[in-house]
Amino acid sequence: MIARRTKFPRALGSLLVLALTAGCGGGPALRAAEQGDLGGARRVLASGSAEEAVDEAEARRIARVVLEQEVKAAKGDAGVSKLKELPSCAEGLDEVLEARAAGSDEVAAIAALIRFDARLWDRDDLAEAARAALASKGASSAWRAVEARGLVAYADGPQRRSLFADGDQAVRLAALKASFDAFDPNDTEALLEAARLDPHPPVRLQAIDAVGNLGGDRVVLALKDLFVKADEDERVAIVGAWSSTRAMDAGGRAQLVRVSQIERGLPQIAAAAVLVRQPGLGAEDAAGVLARAIETGSTRERVFAIHAATLSVPSVREALVKARTDADEDVAIAALGRGLEMAPAEGEGAKPKERAEITQKLLGMAKGKGIRALLAKAALARAGAREVLPLLTTDARSTSEQARKVAGTSLVALGELGRAALLAVDADPRVRTGVACAMLRAK
């Protein structure tokens, strides 16, 4: 827009320009996005000068417009899948989610659940919306799950517990989430039964989480029995349940010590990671378990241990340093990423020389191809290493959807929202949704 000379005082003239600019709806990329012309927005943003001209505020507006249009257009199974990608940025989309939740189809039900889980809607409003939807002709059965999710009051206990065995797994899952929030000891036995017998794995995991939140001797011992026959995911969830405030001092710590000493694999590593952060029984031995898990085991276990490791224990730090040069590239990338945390660029404990060495190693890996190169770029971006910026700007124009999505979220991590805006209007819906959502979350 061209700013014309006026006889107003400078301050008033500036206000007028700002007002007129706001009235024009921002730059050409934003205006194209607002009109639903993502191709036009991409053409504008594909110019390097245009990317630099888009400031952080306008980039966020572009991201919000794109996601609002996705929510408004969401229909059927594809729409449900689309909305399930948005919970982490729900706060920035509250108005459009509220409007979409006013319907009675499955997408509307998912929008309602997202708002409630994001604490944007209270129990009474959720219950009223569910009743209204279920009373309408042709309402989706998904609204039964919405109704179940709102059963968080003590008085809702009988109805909530009856739904733990409902024929619809979505309803069961929602009722179990409600139980976690309700914190009602009367749910204990029904939760344990769901954790043992439900045929749907996500429902069993949610039941374990909910009963772990209740804690107490009965829960700790019942989960010990369940642990014997549980699969790996359930065992890790049980470790998490024993780690809850109300389980830890009711025998949970003893169970964590036992698992860290005699079990193997991810449950052992998870238990050790909890203990090493909680001074007391088993903490010292747990540090040794973590250090050994970083050094030996399967790639999956070693990477898990690296990410679960605390940096405050010398033996664990030593294992992490050693892993930076491991022959297994997946292990090395994970360890180098943690190494950037151990070597801050400035401030107290700054280690600029060590950080520069780690950065160069990761940059070498980042210049390769495939998933490992993407992992290296993401690790650098998370640590704020701006040396990776040229690689990310190149990937923003890659033919690979995965590379573009990683580039977009990594640009956001570096605070380069203007450059990320190109990927918020990407032709691939998964890319633009993921990047735009990251832009709304960015602080």
Image (tube, rainbow, N blue to C red):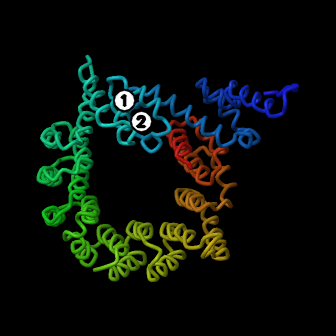
Disc 2 packing (10 Å; few <14; some 14–19; many ≥20): many
Precedes in sequence: disc 2 or disc 1: 2
Question: Which residue does the numbered mark 2 point to in the structure image?
Answer: 83
Q: Residue 325: percent from the left, percent from the top?
A: 54, 76
In the displayed structure, 361 sits above or below 402; it is below
Nearer to the camera, 140 or 211? 211
Question: Percent position (x, y) of residue 289?
Answer: 35, 78
Residue occupying image coordinates x 65% and y 34%: 42
The image quarter in which residue 355 lies: bottom right
Q: Residue at x 35, y 82 (%)?
A: 284
* Horizontal side, residue 277 vs residue 389: left or right: left
Q: Is residue 34 above or below residue 401?
A: above
Q: Amino acid at mark 1?
A: Val
For mark 1, what is the residue? 107
Q: Quadrant of residue 350?
A: bottom right
Quarter location, residue 188: bottom left
Circles 2 and 1, Cβ within 8 Å, touching? The answer is yes
Name the residue furthest front. Answer: 9
